[in-house]
Structure formats: structure tokens, C-alpha cells
Amino acid sequence: MSVTYDDCAGVETSSESFWEVGNYKRTVRRIDDGYRLCNDLMACIQERAKIEKVYSQQLTDWTKKWKTLIERGPQYGSMERAWQALMTEADRVSDLHHEMRNQINNEDLEKIKNWQKDTFHKQLIGGFKETKEAEDGFRKAQKPWAKKLKELEVLKKAYHLACKEERLAVSRETSTKSDPAAPPDQAKKLSDKVEKCRQDTQK
């Protein structure tokens, strides 16, 4: 007998490897995910710009309110200068956040929009041109490999079946040889069957 047949040998273990046939689909899906993530990033940036605008406006309103109270208040000297410095600092922080809001909206958001527009090209039938090109490219590249893999699976199945047949034939031959009542021509037939099975496993 050439090898011991293992009943588990025919069970295919699934692999999540990119290199396995068809597992490129996760990679191709990243193109569609990239477009959606650009939209999510732009929404995130727009929300941040709104927060910056609101904070800037609140600081401006706060300084206006307190400046008028300080101008009419009884404080003088170092207390008045400290309070005015606090208001000046708040105005500068407000200007800084207003400037940040403008920069986020005008520069960063535009860069992402332009990159998204240049990178992703929608098709009339839905989806993106880049997704279709990647899908077709991977499918074409994997086609010969998939064909060979399918042939290998067929041969592997045939091999394991031949090993099982060989094991059964050897078992029958052994039991026939140990049985003195068995006819000699049956022992010859089983020996021929074992030899044929061994040849089949060697193919």
C-alpha cells in the first residue's frame, strides 16, 4: 500500500489569503469603500468647521458682553488691565478659530473633493470604473490559476479515492489469504485488483 488514506484529507480548509482564488474581492471593495470614506471624512471636516465657527462666535459674543461691562465697571489699574488682556486673548482665540474654520472649509475640504473627483469615476450602470478595471484585471490574472486549481482538486479527489480503493483491496486480499476455504482464483483476482489500485495511486 502506497499511503494510508486519511478521511480528512479531502476536506478543503478555507483560507482568507489574498492570493487564493476569488479573495481579491476584499481588495477591490476597498475602492468603493475609499469613495465612501472620502464622503465621511468631508462630513467630519464640515462638522469640525461648524464647531470652530460656533466656538469663535461664542467667544466673540462673550468678549462683547464683558467689554461693555468692563468699560462701565469700577475696576481700575492692574485689575482693569488684566481683564482687558483676558478680553484681548479671547478675541485672538476667536480670530484663530474663525481662521481655522475658513482654512478647513476652503483648503482641506477642497483638496479632498478634488482628489475624490480625480480618483473615482462613476459609470453609467453604477459603480466605479476603477472597481470594474480592478475586478476584471484580477479575474483575468487568476483565470489560469483557478483552472489549474480546479484540475488539482479533481486529481486530488481521484487520488484519495484510489488510495481508499487500494486500502480496501489490500484488506480483502489479506482476509482472503488467511481464509483456507477461499478459492485460489479469488485470491488471484484480489491480488490483481491490489496491483491495479497501486498503479492507479501512482498515476
Image (cartoon, rainbow, N blue to C red):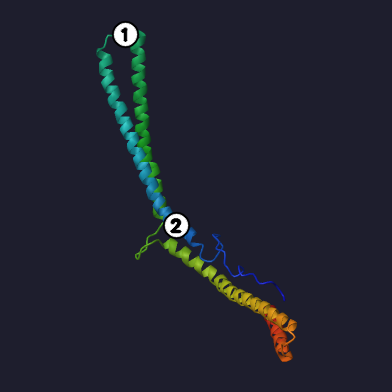
Q: How crowded is mark 2: few (under 14 residues within 10 Å), some or many (20 or more)?
A: many
Give me the disc on residue 31. 2
The residue that appears at 27% across and 26% down in the rendered structure is: 61
144 or 60: nearer the eye? 144
Report the label total.
2
Q: Position of 123 compared to 192: left or right?
A: left
The residue that appears at 44% across and 57% down in the rendered structure is: 31
What kind of residue is marked 1? Tyr
Q: Which of marks 1 and 2 is nearer the N terminus?
A: 2
The residue that appears at 55% across and 64% down in the rendered structure is: 20
Picture quarter containing residue 17?
bottom right
Helix or strand or loop: what does disc 1 sit on? loop
Residue 203: tell me if it is visible: no
Give me the disc on residue 128. none
Q: Distance between the residues labelled 1 and 2?
A: 64 Å
Q: Name the residue under label 1.
A: 76
13 or 100: nearer the eye? 13
Helix or strand or loop: what does disc 2 sit on? helix
What kind of residue is marked 2? Ile
125 or 103: nearer the eye? 125
